[in-house]
Amino acid sequence: TMDDGLSRAVTKVFVALFKQKLIYKDQRLVNWDPKLETAISDLEVQTREVKGKLWYLRYPLKERPGEFITVATTRPETMLGDTGVAVHPEDPRTRHLIGLHAVLPLVGREIPIVGDDYADPEKGSGAVKITPAHDFNDFEVGRRHRLPAISIFDRTAHVTDAAPPAYRGLERFAARERILADLTEQGLVEKVDDITHSVP
């Protein structure tokens, strides 16, 4: 495929498809293997049921000092890249918070609370932290609500300079332990449940 004739043919077809708006270039999430440092095809990813934890984390409300919104997550380390919180627009417990802002613990970033059907009132706390750069569903929610995607892991799953200095360079599971310890110290871990969930 590197021969001149074939290369010209490939270029011609790609340019033609691009002009017809049938292909486009974009930033998208991929399945990434930090050990092999390569993307993995969706066809090669196997989803398995595993035992894990569901952490309930309290995010302070900017407009209501002393009040919190509780989000539930299986990956607390990704909170460093949160850019929003989603609640279901018809959930009577949280719909009044749509349009307000949470202050991301440990980071201090103000993130909007958005109404989105992706938030399931029957799961967890009913409020979902949105990390568009590190979750396929969150990526789509981020697109719908124009939330930025902040990548906080490098190719080997170590925390990048996009995170506060205390967490930079930590491997993802070491970062999880440090983040949970810091959140616990600040009284922001509401509870922890043992769960079984699907992990790719």
Image (cartoon, helix red, strand yellow):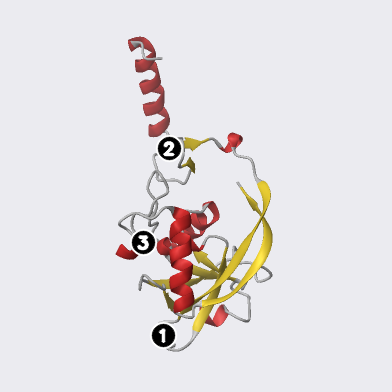
- Asked if disc 3 and disc 1 are in contact, CB closer than 8 Å, the reply is no
N-terminal label among 2 and 3? 2
Locate residue 12 relative to residue 96 in the image: left or right: left
Q: Secondary structure at mark 2?
A: loop
Residue under numbered circle 3: 167
Marks 2 and 1 sit apart, C-alpha to C-alpha, by: 42 Å
Q: Secondary structure at mark 3?
A: helix
Marks 2 and 3 sit apart, C-alpha to C-alpha, by: 21 Å
Q: Nearer the viewer, residue 9 or 93?
A: 93
Residue 63 numbered mark, or none: 1
Image location of residue 131, percent across then percent down: 46, 60
Q: Is residue 27 above or below residue 168?
A: above
Q: Residue at x 59, y 34 (%)?
A: 44
Is the N terminus in the top left, top right, bottom left or bottom right quadrant? top left
Image location of residue 109, percent across then percent down: 36, 71
Q: Amino acid at mark 3?
A: Tyr
N-terminal label among 2 and 1? 2
Q: Secondary structure at mark 1?
A: loop
Q: Residue at x 59, y 62 (%)?
A: 118
Q: Is residue 76 above or below residue 58?
A: above
Q: Is residue 36 above or below residue 169?
A: above
Locate residue 108 relative to residue 118 in the image: left or right: left
Q: Is residue 171 above or below residue 33?
A: below
Locate residue 73 relative to residue 50 in the image: left or right: left
